[in-house]
Amino acid sequence: MTDTLVRILGKEAGVRGIACVTTDLVREAAGRHGTSPAATAALGYGLTGAVLLGALLKVQHRVALKIAGGGPLQKMITESDSYGNVRGYVNVPNVPAARTIEPDVVAETIGRNGNLTVVKDMRLKNLYESTVPLQTGYLDADLTYYLNQSEQTPSVVEIGVKVDESGEVLAAGGLLLQTLPGEEISALEQLSERLDDLPPLGDLLAEGRTPQDLLATIFGGVDFEWLEERPLHFACGCSRDRSLQALQLLSREDLEALIEEGEAVVDCHFCHERYVFGSEELQRLLVRQ
Ligand SMILES: [Zn+2]
């Protein structure tokens, strides 16, 4: 099953449903960052959370989650755009975990003494930014809190990431149920109870249940239409050109020091791609200053 996001609309009930599988992109992020099993699971939660919030965006908009919970992971930043391009990183990739990776390990790894900040680039003059205190360290519960409190939109988020002891990502994905503007919350409550009765999401996805299948189960008996199905990818917007532009901003002294060293290496935080610039290229930057 490749990474996919599915969106449905229950017009009469006044509720929308989004479900995604993110196993491959979490695997790729974990591989790029060399994360330990505990950090992989936390990163999987963060990336999937960004995917779900990204699915609520309009075309060309972007969302970033900044999570600083005071746990051993320290800080995590994940981003998604409206096209399903996702990237992210954690500050401490080698957080040890003493036991099997269960959701409570993720909550401990993230911590609960800190904040969740949601930043949206909606192509306006200013970025939208909203911070809520982390309630639990269970990122899905914290995103539920954020959507209900900060955006005042009755919503339920569930994320599941299954990582084995060796760090292999067995399955990852998420669900978002949300009341449409101006509608009663009774349908959301009913769907949310059904979701609670299901086994953990990570287990269902590991068994091969698809996002379509999960939404159909939860919405059983509630009229809905399929709106969209789209692929999701780990993708970073960094490039050699952009890295060179960043070097161009260095002071003359710093550039001269790099030339002395023989090269400059720009290592992208988000994807760990390394861009190496030799002294000749750096010399050209110096001339342009
Ligand atoms: Zn990058």
Image (cartoon, helix red, strand yellow):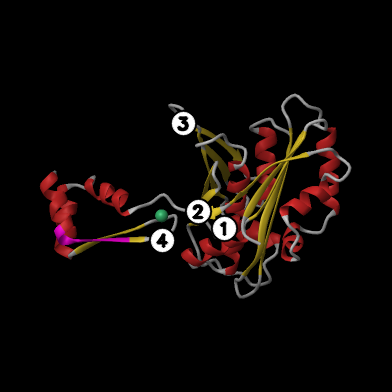
Q: Which mark is residue 272?
A: 4
Residue 97 occupies quadrant? bottom right
Residue extending furthest toward the left = 287
Q: Which residue is mark 1?
A: 43
Q: Secondary structure at mark 2?
A: strand
Asked if the residue at tag 1 contacts the one at tag 4, i.e. Cβ–Cβ closer than 8 Å, the answer is: no
Query: What x and y, as percent, mark residue 210?
Result: 73, 57
Q: Earlier in the sequence, mark 4 or mark 3?
A: 3
Quarter of the picture containing the N terminus is bottom right
In space, the residues marked 4 and 2 are separated at their CA atoms by 10 Å
Q: Earlier in the sequence, mark 4 or mark 2?
A: 2
Q: Earlier in the sequence, mark 3 or mark 1?
A: 1
Eye-nearest disc, 3 or 2: 3
Q: Which residue is mark 2?
A: 88
Query: What x and y, as percent, mark residue 119?
Result: 52, 38
Question: What's the amino acid at mark 2?
Answer: Gly
Q: Cβ(mark 4) to ligand 1 < 8 Å?
A: yes
Quarter of the picture containing the C terminus is top left
